[in-house]
Image: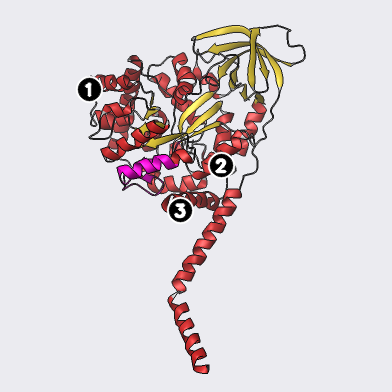
Amino acid sequence: MKLQLISFKTRLIIYLKRSASVIFLLCFVSVIFIFIFNAKQFKPGGLQPVVSGKQYVLDNVNLVMVEEQTILKNQQLVINDGVIEDILPSGNTTQTAYQVIDGNNAFVTPGLFDMHVHHLERKALALSLAHGVTSVRMMRGYRMHLLWREELNNNEWLGSNLYLSSPVFASRNTHPLNQPVLSPKHARELVEAAHEQQFDLIKLYGYMDPAEFEAVIERANELGMAVAKHGPHPARGSSWQYLDGLQSLEHVEDIYQGLLDYQFDRKELVRAVVKIKATGVPVTPTLAVFDHLSLLSNEKHDYIAQLPLEYLNPVRMDIEEEHAITRWLSDTPKQSAFHITKGDFLKEIVKELHRQQVSLLVGSDSGMMYMAAGVSSHREMALLKQSGLSDFDVIIAATINPANALKVSERYGSIKVGKVADLVITDQDPTVDIAHLEVPYAVIKNGQWLSREQLDELKESAKTHPSFWVTATLLIEDVIYRYFS
């Protein structure tokens, strides 16, 4: 019996020694899951509350009617429980029980959309709202974003409406934060999983096998799920017909790189835009991100010193500095000069798209490359104007066009009775100069009046961030979930 006991203890010691690495791994995984659990419960301080159910009259205002492309002057908006209840001439006294706010001849524009953003914390949606951007489309969705959207829908805090893409579907050689697609069968399974998790759309790269590319779109169409395509062209070896009916096509830079094969070829540009127009799909130019990178290349640290870096998430800052920013700062004078030439040509692409009446969407790519929320949306609008769009055209690209693309125009995108009261109030006419939208007099979010002082509070609060480890843990959780599910 004693010999057996010694033998057992010896075997146990040998087993433990051999299993030390396994035990360490289990402990490490346990710690990671504890971090994940705590990170998922984390909600930063300073988020502003939602106040619903207000009834008031906004009198003596001028309405920017985007669908009619006109200004309706001397009007009164009746707002009840987040909805535009009536539109009447100024001075009307029908709603005597409602609070009356004198608009002092201000201009009312539908809430703005930014259709291409990448953010890693809730405060970015509050910061967007503070700049009059009442809706955003997140173009690389993580599981934490599903939680944010639920919180916003439950009126737990003030932020822009959130439309959420799946993780980016890409080729098998992509980086871990994207979703690699390994086969046509795998493509269909991934679409089904994204649909089940209730992402609003699929974000699809074109740098992948055409059979996998086509399988994603075919299965999404069968499920009635929208698809936004990175690059306004099909995957190499696929057909243009697969773009028909998509929600949007992203980045005019990819027209230059893909359809024009890196050539400043204006004749080929016209032919390329004819193909894009035939799809009937709107384009999100994202001029702001290349303009931003060009300024980094040309002005280096002098430009960085002007940026509102206090609004940027610490994880994003580290990732961008390591893998992107240093590359642009190291450009030679010749490379920097080329970026200016290329940026001018990208505006020509937008001008041709507009000339051929391709629907355009405002999308900034904010959250990337040191680009802050809200500010970048207005930069995109300014660049669209520089590309030949009128001020009214730019406002349309920031309001009703996105609402149509997202199929939410029955509730958002214009000023009409029955629509949600997401509105931007400015002292001066934005159809004369869209720059007036950059500093709103007030913003109305789902009927809630936010004064300039309250908007400033939202901006100030956005300077505080979750810790590096909270954000990093949530990204790790997303990768773990996708790897094991």
Q: Name the residue tied to disc 1.
A: 268
Q: In which quarter of the image is residue 275?
A: top left
Q: Is mark 1 on a helix, strand or loop?
A: helix
Q: Name the residue tied to disc 2.
A: 147
Badge 3 crowding class, 10 Å Cα cut-off, few under 14, some 14 to 19, many 20 or more, is: few
Q: Is mark 3 on a helix, strand or loop?
A: helix
Q: Name the residue tied to disc 3.
A: 480
What residue is rendered at 66% in x and 12% in y? 104
* C-alpha distance separating marks 1 and 2: 45 Å
Query: Considering depth in this image, is 341 or 368 the residue closer to the camera?
Result: 368
Q: Inspect the magenta stretch and tell me whether residue 341 lies in it.
A: no
Number of numbered discs present?
A: 3
Q: Residue 441 in the image: state x and y as whole percent.
A: 62, 21
Range shown magenta: 165-193
Q: Residue 388 in the image: state x and y as whole percent.
A: 38, 16
What residue is rendered at 31% in x and 18% in y? 352
Q: Residue 200 in the image: state x and y as whole percent.
A: 47, 34
User: In screen coordinates, is 29 left or right of 280?
Assistant: right
Q: Earlier in the sequence, mark 3 or mark 1?
A: 1
On screen, residue 420 above or below 39? above
Q: Earlier in the sequence, mark 1 or mark 2?
A: 2
